[in-house]
Amino acid sequence: MKRKISQFVFLLLSYLVSAQFTIKIEAPKDFSFNEAYLYTLNGSKDILVDKAEKKNDTWVFSVKNNYQGLLKIYFPQANTSVNFISENKNVELRFTTKNNKVHQIDYIDEANNIFYSIQDQQKKKEQILPALYQIQNFYKENSDFGIALKNEIAHLSSDVTYDYEKHPFLNYYFKTYQIYLQESVGKKNPTNDEIISFLNNTQNFLETSSLLKPILMVFLSNTSRTSLGDEIDKLLTTVNIETPRGQTILSELIEIFNVYSIKDLKEKYLKEAKNLKCTINDRLANTIKANTNTEIGKIIPNNIFHNPVNTKVKSLHEVKADKKIIILWSSTCSHCEKEIGEMVLQYNKLKEKNIEVVGLSLDSDAKSYSDKVKMLPWINDTELKGWYSSYVDTYNVHATPTFYIVDAKNKIIANPDNFSEILELLQLK
């Protein structure tokens, strides 16, 4: 008898150790895709933690570590995803589909039901409530529609209530959003000193809330270009870049400077990151690696083509030319449309100089990609995974289009911002 009890206790403890909480996702029978990937969040980066196959139209994930924050399930075959939260408790939801894409989501567990009810209420307050106030002026208060309007206005003017102590992440998320990000008439924007103090002292929920990058953008927008370096130095000194929080903030800033082509500050803080002597967290290590792989003078990482057009070669390195222009692009990117239009006009001139163009697309919709790519004369390939494509990390892509120029030996010689700059660098202008 004692042995049976011991075995039961051991099994129970094993289960508790192996899973903090579970995530159950139900899909309709006509959703034909099987694979699903689970991502947690670190700042603005999705972190892959698990993969599951569908069984009986359901995916079940077991999360082994304590986690409170935003998560995402990504269905690669459909290139669609579902977002939700966990407060280290079980998550359950089901969804309907439209054109084999996620359409409507029913959040069954309490935390997600509250979270998305509050977001829905806030959206309606911002977009619908002002219009209802205007419409109300055209109807008598005691008419059926007037009474209905009054009731709906009262409903949208109220707040969704919940137990703050029972839902600490919800409380953190909405309070932080309200103080640092929400715009409203008469609201005073937070100062940089207030933001620095908050980032230095706030709970660990910050990294899993999706709010870190938007708050950093407020910090940067508060600051003039001439004093930006000094303000960032003050921020990084306070949060201490030898701590995990400081390193995540440093990583976010380097990536922001990448997006907005603020190259001097990017290089300054990337150098600081590389010179750290302490243990570096995964987030910053990946940022350093992505930037190091694409430095001027390095051999650009190779890419094995999936289904390329306008070529029979198997990989990026096998493309033979005196120089290659590599463009990371998407058919839905308006900036890409402008740049690609100019490239098409100049392509014959490039070919005469033995310069080849290789496009790697971050498209996710096969039709959109194929409709566009058939009009392009150069080599193109795609994984049809959107921003989950391997290209993103391999080639340090933070915005489209992203350009590289490499020589005949695949050494990176430039990382220009646009095609006009490419023509100048190649002395073709």
Image (cartoon, helix red, strand yellow):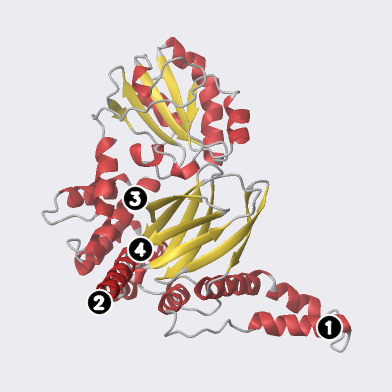
Identify residue for label 4.
223
Disc number placed over residue 146 in the picture, else none: 1
Residue depth check, mark 3 versus mark 2: number of the one nearer the observer: 2
Please determine whether, in this image, residue 81 is positioned above or below residue 193. Answer: above
- Residues under labels 1 and 3: Cα distance? 51 Å
- Residues under labels 1 and 2: Cα distance? 72 Å
In front of the other: 328 or 162: 162
Report the residue that reaches farthest toward the front: 1
Residue 400 lies left or right of residue 244; in this view the side is right
Going by the numbered disc 1, the residue's amino acid type is Gly
Instruction: Answer few, some or many: residues within 10 Å of disc 4's Cα (few below 14, many 20 plus, some between 14 and 19).
Output: some
Instruction: Answer few, some or many: residues within 10 Å of disc 1's Cα (few below 14, many 20 plus, some between 14 and 19).
Output: some
In front of the other: 344 or 90: 90
Report the residue that reaches farthest toward the left: 277
Instruction: Answer few, some or many: residues within 10 Å of disc 2's Cα (few below 14, many 20 plus, some between 14 and 19).
Output: few
Quarter of image, res 14: bottom left
Going by the numbered disc 3, the residue's amino acid type is Glu
Identify residue for label 2.
2
Residue 117 image position (x, y, % from top left): 59, 73
Residue drawn at point x = 28 percent, y = 59 percent = 248
Identify residue for label 3.
255
- Residues under labels 2 and 4: Cα distance? 68 Å
Residue 322 image position (x, y, % from top left): 34, 14
- Mark closest to the chain's N terminus, 1 or 2: 2
